[in-house]
Amino acid sequence: MFLWRLSILGTLLYGACTDSKLKEAEDGVQTVLPGETAQVKAFVLKSKTFNHELISNGAIVAAEKVDLRFAGAEIVEEIYVKNGEKVKKGQKIARLAQFKLESALKQAADNLEKSSLELQDVLISQGYALKDSLKVPAETMKIAKIKSNYENSTIQYELARYHLDHSVLYAPYDGIVANLFAKKYNMPSGNEPFCTIIASQSLDALFTVLESELPLIRKGDQVQLSPFSYQDYTVAAVIDEINPVVDENGMVKVKARIAGSSSRLYEGMHIKIRVQRSAGSQLIIPKEALVLRNNKKVVFTAKDHKAHWNYVETGLENSTGYVVTEGLTDGDSIIYDGNLNLAHETPILILNQKYP
């Protein structure tokens, strides 16, 4: 009988404890009795500058790019460069065969000389000397040049000189050779450029933002871009232009100038854009520190070797963290790793207390 009464009493006490724990769970804060110590990582919360972020996709474009073409149609005699090769301003790119062009210039020079002599004869017949050409009436000089074919000979000479001078292509500035597909000893295509020179020191990032996102950006804002083809590789840029036109899809084109040069970036390369703007000094926690319990935002803090449950409110966020507006104070020890299975007053061992 005595043992039976003890059994009933134990059952009643267990039920009372269970009801107490259920009430605490209903309130949203789960308290556990000291048991196995949880290993966590934490940092001391300090106010620091928060960078608001805008994420977009875009492409690399050349700020300076020129298509080189030959003025005449002759066989390509020499090609001095290859695709992807860096060139300096004034460096030779390619050269056409010179023989016909030089011969044409000589012939044009001879014809011009003959026309000069004929012009002199015409002027003498009119009572003037070539050295007195300034005294010759304009109408008389015009007729004399037509009779001697002097004007046409001059044009032909200048044209022959132009073709010879432009039979060699030079790099207009420091850059990289691209789209060079012509072959030596072949005629260059009349429709396509011989090659393209892309300025190696000036690349831009072209991307679009929503009309509603315009207040979040301005000229001079810092930009981080990451090519989709590379992992863990970012390049800095600064917003240089904002096109003042909203297209039919509600998008606005933005261009950012990439700082310096990089051999890993190519024109047309697809990139991910992250625009950052400072929102001032804020209390910032990493996204890993925030957990949801009963659809409420919770952050655990470390105090007296125990985890403490804190309801928080957050404001702005970026790809790495949240701004905490309520629930935490400067100097709190924030648990950001090992917090998924914690409860209020769980015993903890901090592995690496650190500052953000």
Image (cartoon, helix red, strand yellow):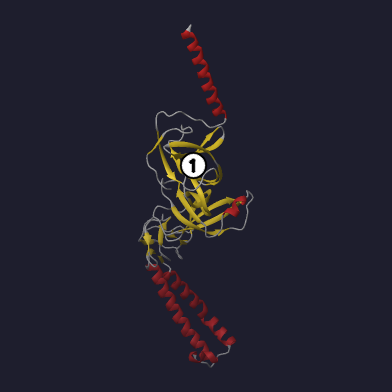
Residue occupying the point 37% across, 68% down: 99
Q: Residue at x 44, y 81 (%)?
A: 113
Residue placed furthest toward the bottom: 127
Spot occupied by residue 11 in the image (x, y as percentages of width and height): 51, 15
Q: Is residue 77 above or below residue 2?
A: below
| Residue with the most extreme top position | 1
Q: Is residue 351 left or right of residue 311?
A: left
Q: Is residue 337 left or right of residue 247?
A: left
**The residue under label 1 is which amino acid type?**
Lys
Describe the element under mark 1 as helix, strand or loop: helix
The answer to whether residue 342 is above or below residue 54 is: above
> Of 118 and 31, which appears nearest the observer?
31
Using residue 72 as the reference point, say whether residue 351 is left or right of it: left
Q: Position of residue 330 (x, y in %)?
A: 49, 48
Q: Is residue 328 above or below residue 241?
A: above
Asked whether 23 or 294 is in front, the reply is 23
Residue sitting at the far right? 248
Across and down, in percent, residue 299 comes to 50, 39
The picture quadrant where one finds residue 187 is bottom left
Judge whether 70 appears above or below 137 on screen.
above
Task: Please tell me which residue is depicted at 47% across the width and 56% down the height of the picture.
Answer: 237
Circle 1 sits on which residue? 287
Percent x, y for residue 263?
A: 39, 55
In-front residue for pair 106/41 = 41
| Residue 348 makes an appearance in the image | yes
| Residue 319 visible to an observer of this rendering | no
| Numbered label tally | 1
